[in-house]
Image (cartoon, rainbow, N blue to C red):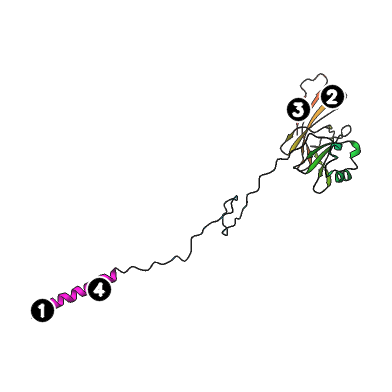
């Protein structure tokens, strides 16, 4: 009788032990995150944004700048066959009788003109914008130099600047003046000057 009771107790313990082990091996369900990872998406050819809506950016890279080029320059009559010439003649009617030197930029959509001045007057420059048919006179930064030499023709181009050189003088002394003409901003700036008198081979430079 005692043996039977003991066997029954042992069987009950084995059953209970199996139940506890089964409960402990049940895996907890996986919980999805409340916030999804942020995925940045940019438009090809644009810079990487700091924060953005997918498919857009907060900054867009500017297209490469165009290098403005000019032809060989000359008198305005050489452009008589251009489609813009009639409008140009109307806008520049007041200065054409002075036979200005003209330089045409096809990809810059502009014509720049030079009218040499009299003694100490400096040259007058103009920019004609083909798109708007507007003629504008260039501003001059003379560095408070009262008497300006008058360049007679356009020089070499350096970026957005055309170099100009003019000579002026009397009574045995003269000055060679160097100017920069910024054709984008339509502005002439006096840069430097070489002053020389008879017998002075080296002269004296003045920088502005």
Instruction: Give yes or no for contact between labels 3 and 4 (Cβ–Cβ under 8 Å).
Output: no
Q: Give the secondary structure at mark 1.
A: helix
3 or 4: mark nearer the eye: 4
Badge number at residue 19: 4
Residue 15 sits inside the magenta stretch: yes
What residue is shown at x 19% (from left), y 73% (from top)? 14
Q: Give the secondary structure at mark 3.
A: strand
Give the Cα distance between marks 3 and 4: 105 Å
Give the Cα distance between marks 2 and 3: 14 Å
4 or 2: mark nearer the eye: 4
Q: Quadrant of residue 152?
A: top right
Which residue was labeled with disc 1? 4
Are there few (<14), some (14-19), or many (20+) residues within 10 Å of tag 4?
A: few
Give the Cα distance between marks 2 and 1: 140 Å
Which residue was labeled with disc 2? 173
Q: Give the secondary structure at mark 2.
A: strand
Q: Is residue 160 above or below residue 133?
A: above
Give the Cα distance between marks 1 and 3: 127 Å
Give the Cα distance between marks 4 and 2: 118 Å
Instruction: Give yes or no for contact between labels 1 and 3 (Cβ–Cβ under 8 Å).
Output: no
């Amino acid at each position: 009788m005692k043996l039977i009771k003991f066997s029954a107790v042992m069987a009950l313990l084995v059953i209970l032990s199996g139940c506890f082990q089964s409960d402990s091996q049940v895996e907890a369900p996986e919980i999805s995150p409340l916030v999804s990872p942020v995925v940045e998406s940019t438009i090809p050819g644009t810079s990487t944004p700091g924060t953005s809506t997918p498919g857009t950016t907060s900054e867009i890279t500017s297209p490469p700048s165009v290098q403005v080029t000019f032809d060989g320059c000359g008198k305005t009559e050489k452009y008589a066959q251009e489609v813009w010439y009639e409008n140009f003649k109307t806008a520049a009617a007041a200065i054409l009788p002075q036979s200005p030197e003209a330089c045409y930029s096809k990809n810059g959509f502009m014509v720049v003109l030079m009218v040499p001045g009299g003694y100490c007057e400096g040259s007058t420059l103009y920019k004609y914008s083909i798109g708007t048919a507007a003629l504008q006179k260039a501003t001059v930064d003379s560095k408070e130099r009262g008497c300006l030499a008058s360049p007679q023709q356009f020089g070499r181009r350096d970026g957005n600047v055309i170099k100009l050189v003019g000579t002026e003088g009397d009574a045995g002394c003269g000055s060679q003046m160097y100017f920069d003409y910024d054709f984008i901003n339509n502005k002439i700036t006096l840069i430097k000057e070489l002053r020389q008198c008879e017998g002075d081979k080296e002269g004296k430079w003045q920088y502005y």
